[in-house]
Image: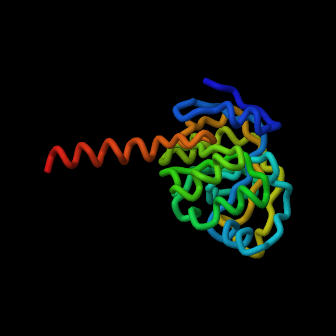
Amino acid sequence: MIELTEPFTEDHIRSLKVGDMVNITGRLFTGRDAVHKYLYEGGESPVDLSNQIIYHCGPVVVKEGGQWVVKAAGPTTSAREEPYQGEVLRRFGVRAVIGKGGMGPKTLAALREYGAVYMHAVGGAAQVLARCVTRVNGVYMLEEFGSPEAIWEFQVEKFPVVITMDSHGGSLHQEVLARSTEALKELL
């Protein structure tokens, strides 16, 4: 298990390879469809995303005793961000993206060019992943986009992910597709 702690430098991120299991300690910023579209279309980020991680997540967050508490923080399907992700990586210097299901060739090319990785979080484990969130540092664009689409800034400890797309052009998703296609041809 690789322990990845903030700051998330380009050298650290480029050292990661497909198949590496990683525990993240530091900050994560959530961002889903509305945020990606907004940033892609020229919007300015309310937070500095350089050398940070964007988590494709629409968390369940409630206020308890005046503090935000994360009840569920599972990944959402990343493919929806494919039209936007490469430009967001380029424009804002994001070092990693977390989601589920992988992303396409446009994002893979951007990961390679800009020194970033795609990290897969286990779907269906939203409550377990929420336990890794030790604090909500802030919420941004809540009024504009609503709770699931807002940018939530989480402080996390030992948040578990697997590298499935790296900055060297490796993609576990492409490998699985190729093997599955070959297996299907044999069956047919």
Q: Quadrant of residue 6?
A: top right
Horizontal and vertical percent for residue 97?
65, 49
Quarter holding the N terminus is top right
* The one of 166 and 7 positioned closer to us in this rendering: 166
Establish if 33 lies above or below 64: below
Establish if 99 lies above or below 144: above
Q: Residue at x 69, y 36 (%)?
A: 14
All told, the count of numbered labels is 0
Establish if 110 lies above or below 175: below
Horizontal and vertical percent for residue 42?
78, 73
Q: Quadrant of residue 20?
A: top right
Q: Quadrant of residue 48?
A: bottom right
* The one of 116 and 102 positioned closer to us in this rendering: 116
Q: Residue at x 23, y 43 (%)?
A: 183
Horizontal and vertical percent for residue 171?
50, 43
- Report the side of 186 relative to 48 (left or right): left
Horizontal and vertical percent for residue 164?
53, 41
- Report the side of 129 relative to 122 (left or right): right
Q: Residue at x 82, y 51 (%)?
A: 50
As drawn, the residue found furthest toward the top would be 1
- Report the side of 128 relative to 184 (left or right): right
* The one of 13 and 46 positioned closer to us in this rendering: 13
Q: Residue at x 78, y 69 (%)?
A: 141
The colour mode here is rainbow
